[in-house]
Image (cartoon, rainbow, N blue to C red):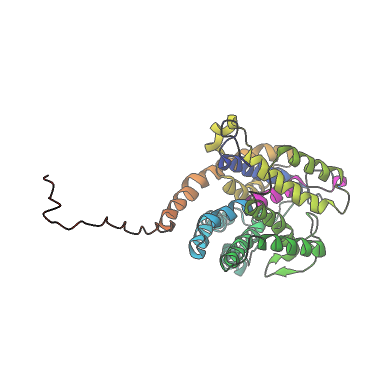
Amino acid sequence: MPISSKVHANPNTGFAWLRMIGAITVIVDHSMPLLHPQRLTIFPASWHMSPGYIALMAFFAMSGYQIQDSWARDPSWWRFSARRLLRIMPPLLVVVLVTVFVIGPLVTTASDYWTNLQTWRYLVGTTVLFYLQHVLPGVFTDNPYPWSVNGAIWTLPMELLGYGLVLVAGLVVLAGATRWVLVVVLGGLVYADTVLRATFEYHGAGGSLLFVPIGSTVSFLVPFALGMVLHGFRDKIPLRPWVAVVLFAAYLALSQTPASRYLLAVSASYGAITLAMHWPRKLEAGGPHVYGSYGTYIWGFPIQQLLILAGVRQVWLLILLAVPASYVVGRLSWDYVEKPTQRLRRYLRPPAPVRLPVAAPPQLPVTAATPLRRS
């Protein structure tokens, strides 16, 4: 579907805006359970929906679309893997190091902080993601929500698994399969999600893969795979704003029914990608200011915990203080961590295509009948 450049912004700008809006939405939604743990979301419990969970569904769909595009442009398994690690690991490593070596010592109530094995388990386990740890000795233990130092990063192992999904599916296609393998992957995940039945209130059945809940992982990989399919079949599936509105309206209307789990994944995926591709050009000027959503997302939770430790006890005040603070730190992460490490990607460019030499025109023999032309 052609997108008019006169009306719509560059899709990268649209994706950046939506990711920043999503990161802020997650921070806002976390404000309620961080102060009132009996509440899982800022929405009333009777609504059975969470704006943060919807934002995460959209996050995963956009990742599926964009990462599938990255693979399609350069289907090299090692360059693809290196790019993904360069994207996700440096900001994560910084937030983990600052949490362990700066925030922890400043706020801990534990006298054995440095000798406690849990401190080092957090450092190593959270850095490698699949052994994700949530607590540091004596850190935020007097807060209303003492069970996690940085609860936002629990989705990062799932994001890595999504990258693996793109890689495996891409290699299968390179081996001779058609793009319909993406639909097969999506169908398998939808079936597993139907069985495991995770929601924002419940991690679902299936236990854990190391320290990562399987049910929630499958639920988030469904929109990720939807994003892959929307990219893989972008010549067949039109992205129409009115369809996105209808899908989201259907989700709202049926949010109290079993169909809501499927409508949420479809409406969040199709809606986010469609909106990114149709982002108003009038907002393109603000594009540079909305990069940094990843840093905003992973720093929001510990910033909120610090504000609560400092005495903030009203949800509205926590939102008012945490959102701009997280945005500023996210921008700093973008400028001083993410952009510098992304420059390393220039070493991961695909090799230039080899140009075969152009055959020289046949030379006529030099004879008396073909005199040489003077220069």
Instruction: Please tell me which residue is depicted at 76% across the width and 60% down the height of the picture.
Output: 190
**Quadrant of the rendered structure where residue 114 is?**
bottom right
Front in this rendered view, residue 321 or 186: 186
**Quadrant of the rendered structure where residue 116 is?**
bottom right
Q: Is residue 163 above or below residue 265?
A: below
The location of residue 268, given as percent across then percent down, is 73, 47
Magenta-highlighted stretch: main secondary structure? Answer: helix
Residue, far front: 369
Front in this rendered view, residue 310 or 265: 265
Instruction: Please tell me which residue is depicted at 84% across the width and 48% down the height of the picture.
Output: 48
Q: Is residue 27 above or below residue 118?
A: above
Count of residue discs: 0
Front in this rendered view, residue 3 or 268: 3
Q: Which residues are magenta?
A: 46-62
Instruction: Please tell me which residue is depicted at 62% across the width and 36% down the height of the picture.
Output: 279
**Quadrant of the rendered structure where residue 102 is?**
bottom right
Task: Answer with left or right where residue 175 lies relative to residue 350.
Answer: right
Q: Is residue 274 above or below residue 201?
A: above
Q: Is residue 56 magenta?
A: yes
Location of the C terminus (image quadrant): top left
Q: Is residue 81 magenta?
A: no
Task: Answer with left or right where residue 248 lies relative to residue 150.
Answer: right
Instruction: Please tell me which residue is depicted at 66% across the width and 57% down the height of the picture.
Output: 155
The location of residue 173, given as percent across then percent down, is 59, 64
